[in-house]
Image: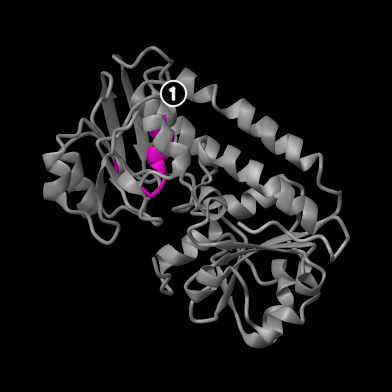
Amino acid sequence: MTAPISRRTLFRGAGVLGLGVALAGCSGGPAPAGDGAGTRTITHKLGTTEITGTPERVVTIGLTEQDYVLALGVVPVGVREWFGEQPGALWPWAAGRAGGAVPEVLPVAELNYEQVAALAPDLILGVNYTMTQAEYDTLSALAPTVGPPVEYADYGAPWQVINEVVGTALGRSEQAAQLVAPIEQGIADLRATVPAGRTGLLAALLEDGSYYVYAEGPAPALLADLGLALPPAAEALFTGENRPPVLLSPEQLGVLEADVLVVGLYGAFADTATIDDPVFANLRVAQEGRAVLLPELSETNGALSFGSVLSLPVALDQLAPRLAAALDGDPATAVPAA
């Protein structure tokens, strides 16, 4: 897949940003586990959705919800394609949970309502998605639909919140809650191996040779959770509450200097898994072997981009040796290729 300069590509570089939502059950909180047959209410940006019973035919139109649905033991009948062109739009960490089933793939460019209707959904999840009122109204006529959340900017909530929302929608809140602690422990374990006071930065090199840097999203959030702070020069680029990706001019590439720099590679750069750029090659982060290069379709890049309950353990496992090599202070230590 090529990577045009688009909002979707920029999100891919960041590790797609998540979503959050106000949860309210009959008692004011998420429905308890085992209460799937009961009624629970989810308030989101497009309205309030009431769900009764145990959904079995789930369609996910957001970019990453399929991972959360599968983690809770439900195989979606329809999944929105994001990137990777995997069978059923399921990456390896998720495909194993589907029991051989291959969901129908919904195109990422524009929703086909007839295709969604033909799947006879009893729940539609658009949590990790920017949904218009017209889309919500049309989808809600087909099945209960959960839209983007109230509390966070679109693509802005942590994975724990997405997990809680999906768990509530499926009537499996307790099961969802049990997924959190092992992942948080894995993050804590890897953080314990990272030297204190180091900086980390996420960037993307697009096929046209442009560099973007990111402050928000699952991948930057994971670097922060691992104790890697944004370098001051990069931090200065982001102001206010809304911190979208920043395009760097050639004169600004010094902003990429960090103790560890994670770079998503797209287009021809992904094909070669290298950065053929003399300006980048002159940066200390490149000369001292502190750059972690992740081609677009590598499992490491995919796992970081999804930032889900299923992909995060993969991301942590694959980041560990790469961070160790980048931060060991020895330029001769090669960072393992992704």
| Residue for badge 1 | 30
Label 1 Cα neighbours within 10 Å, binned few <14 / some 14-19 / many ≥20: many
Point 69% across, 38% down: residue: 187
Q: Amino acid at mark 1?
A: Pro
Left/right placement of residue 103 relative to residue 307 reads: left
Does residue 166 appear anywhere in the picture? Answer: no
Residue 10: image location, x then y, percent: 48, 66
Residue 143: image location, x then y, percent: 19, 35
Say which of 165 and 259 sits in front. Answer: 259
Left/right placement of residue 36 relative to residue 289 reads: left
Residue 77 quadrant: top left
- Looking at the picture, does residue 276 appear above or below residue 97? below
Point 62% across, 72% down: residue: 274
Is 228 covered by the magenta stretch? Answer: no
Quadrant that contains the N terminus: bottom left
Residue 230: image location, x then y, percent: 73, 61
Quadrant that contains the C terminus: bottom right
Way the structure is coloured: one colour
Q: Say what secondary structure mark 1 lies in.
A: loop
Residue range of the region highlighted in magenta in the rendering: 60-70
